Amino acid sequence: MVAQLIKRLASLLVVLFCVVSLTFLLIRISPGGPFDGERKIPAAIEKQLLQKYKLDGSLWQQYTGYLGDLIQGDLRLSTKYRNRSVNEILAQTLPVTLTLGAVAFTLATFFGIWLGTVAAMHRQTWQDYGAMFLALAAISLPSYITGPLLILLFALTLGWLPAGGWGGVSHLVLPAVVLAAPAAAVIARLMRGSMVETLQQDFVRTARAKGLSESAVVYRHALRIAILPVVSYLGPLAAHLLTGSIIVETVFHIPGAGGFFVHSILNRDGFLLGGMVIVYCVMLVVFNLGVDLAYGLLDRRIKSHA
Amino acid sequence: MLDPRVFQRIKKNPAAIASALILLLIVLACVAGPFFLPASLGEPGPSQYAPPSRDHPFGTDLNGRDVLYRLLTGGRISLLVGLCGALVSLCIGTTWGLVAGYVGGRTDALLMRLVDILYSVPRLIFILIAINAFNAGLQEWASAEGWAWLAQTSRIAILIVTLGFIEWLTMARIVRGQVLSLKERQFITAARALGQSHINILLRHLLPNLAGTILVYLTLAIPAVIIDESFLSFLGLGIQAPQASWGSLLADGAGAINPVRSFWWLLVFPATAMALTLLALNFLGDALRDAFDTRS
C-alpha cells in the first residue's frame, strides 16, 4: 500500500515535470511576448519589465529559474494582472470552481446510479429505452448547447432561476445541472451494463430465493458489486468536473478559475497558465489514486497493485 | 471485411435509419445549400436582428446577415473539420495500434505507456496553446510561400491537425486490442508460414479485419472532433470572424439573449442544427457498434 502510494506520487512528479516544461516552452517560443499591446513599449521599459518578471536571459535560464521557484511553491506573478501573484488568483477563484464541481459531481453520481439501476431492473421495457435514449442525448450534447437553451427557457422565459452570476443556492442550480448531465449519462450507461450482469449472478438468485423484496435484492445486495465499474470512472470524472467547467463558467458568468484559464492563454500569461495546468494535473492524478484506494476497500477480492 | 449481416442488422434499427437520413439531409443542405442562395445573404445587410420571416426564415443577426445562410456555411466548416480531424486521428491511431499490437514486446509496452501518459494530460490545454503557438507561424510561412489559400484557412488547417492529434488515443487502444487477438488466429499463422512479409500481413490480412472497428470509431470520432472544434470556436479561439462555424454561431447566440431582449433565433437554430448532427452521429455510431458486436 505504502509502496504503491510512493510509486504513484513519483509518477505524478514526472507527469507534472513534463507538462510544466511543455507549457512553458510552448508559451515562450510562440510568437508575441506577454507585454505586447496596442502600443509598442519603449525598449528600456520592456527590458525592465522582463527583468521584473524574470523573463530575461536565455530560454534555458528562464526555464531553470522558473522550475526553481516552482519547487519553492512560488507560482510567480501574473504578467497580465499586474502585481497579483498566481497563488493569489488561484486562491480566489478555485473555491468557486470547486464548489460548482462538487455539487455537479454529487448530482451526477446520484442520478446516474439511480437511472442506470432503474433501466437495468426494467430491462427492455419503455423505462429502459427511455433512460438510455436520454443518456445518449445527454452525452451527445455539449454544455454550450444545453446551457444557453436552459437559460433561455428557465431564466429568461419562465423567470424561475437567475440567468447567471454567483451567490446563493439558486445560482448553482442551472450550471450544476448542465455540468452534471453528460457525466450522469455516462454513469447511467455504465451502471446499467454492470447491473444487468450482476443480476444474473448466483448470489442474487440466493437473495431472491430467501424471499427478499426486489428492491432489497437490488439496492442492498447487487448494487455493492455492480457499482465497481462506476467507481473506477469517478476518479477521472471528479477531476474533470472540478476543473473542466470552463465553458459552464463562461456561459453562466461565474467568477471561477475557468475564465482566467482561457485568458491566460490569450494574454500569453505563461505563469498563470503554468499554475492552472499544475493544479489540473495534480487533481487528475490525485483523484485517480483516491479511486484506486476506494476500489480496494469496496471489493476485498481486488488486490491493489499499481 | 464488412459482413453483409451487419447491414441487415442496421436496417432493422429504426433509430439508426432515421439518424442516417437526418445526417444525409444536413450534409446535403450544408454542402449544396449555399449554392442556391444568393451570396449577398452572408454580407451585412440593412435589416438588423430581424425575427424569422419569409425573407429570412431563420432571422438575421447583429450585422443583418441571414442566419440560415450563416448556419449552412458554418456547417460546412464544422463538418469539414469534424471529418478531416477524425480521419487524421484515424490514421495515427490505426498505425499506432497496429504496430504496437503486431510487434508486441517492448515496443508495445513503450507505445502504450506513451498513450497512457497522453491520456492523463489535459488535452484541450495543449490544443489551445498549440493553436496560438503555430497559427502565426503557419500564416507567415504560407504568405511567404505565396499560398494565399493556406494563409486564409490556416486556422482550419491547424484545427484539423491538432484535433486529429489529440483524438487518436482511444483508437490506438482499440486497434491494439483487436490486433492482439487477431494475430493469434490461424490465417495469420498461415500467412506467415507462406513467407509473407510483415507489411503484407499488416495491410492485407490485419487491416481488412479491422474495417468494422474503424468504421464504428470513425462515426464516434467525428462528433468528438466537432465538439472540440465548436468548444474552441465558442470560446473565440477556433474559427475567427467573419468566418463562422456552429461553435461561433452558438457563441453569438448565447450573447444575444439577455433579460431585456432575447434574440432567440440566433441561439435556437444553431443549437438545433448542431444538436441534431451530434445526436444522429452518436446514435448511428451506437447502432453500428451493436451491429458489429457479434457476441450479443
Image (cartoon, grey):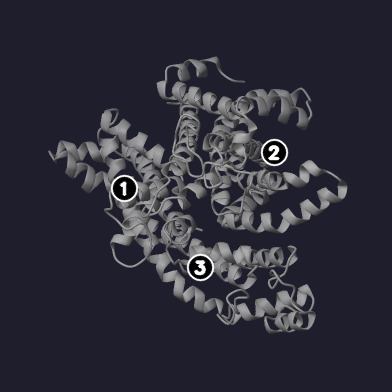
Mark 2 and mark 3, same subunit?
no
Q: Please state which of residues B25 and A1 is positioned toward the viewer in this rendering.
A: B25
Q: Which mark is residue A157?
A: 1
Q: Circle 1 marks a residue in which chain?
A: A
Using the numbered discs, state the Cα–Cα distance from disc 3 to disc 1 in whole angstroms.
57 Å
* Residue tagged 2: B95
Amino acid under disc 3:
Ala
- In the rendered image, which quarter is residue A40 located in? bottom right
User: Furthest residue to the right?
Assistant: B145
The residue at 70%/23% (across/down) is B190
Q: Give the class, few, some or many, for how many residues have Cα within 10 Å of label 2's Cα (few <14, many ≥20).
A: some
Which residue is the site of mark 3?
Answer: A3
Between disc 2 and disc 1, the foreground one is: 1
Q: Chain of mark 2?
A: B
Query: Percent x, y for residue A11?
Result: 58, 64
- Percent position (x, y) of residue B147? 83, 43
Amino acid at dot 2: Thr
- Work out whether residue A199 or residue A272 is closer to the camera in this orientation and state it: A272
Q: Residue at x 39, y 60 (%)?
A: A101
Q: Is residue B29 visible?
A: yes
Viewer-proximal residue among B104 and A127: A127
Residue density around tag 1, few if under 14, some if 14–19, many if 20 or more, within 10 Å:
few
Dividing the picture into quadrants, the one containing residue B121 is bottom right
Distance from the alpha carbon under mark 2 to that under mark 3: 36 Å
User: Dot 3 surroundings within 10 Å: few (below 14), some, or many (20 or more)?
Assistant: few
Q: From the viewer's perspective, is residue A73 above or below residue A296? A: below
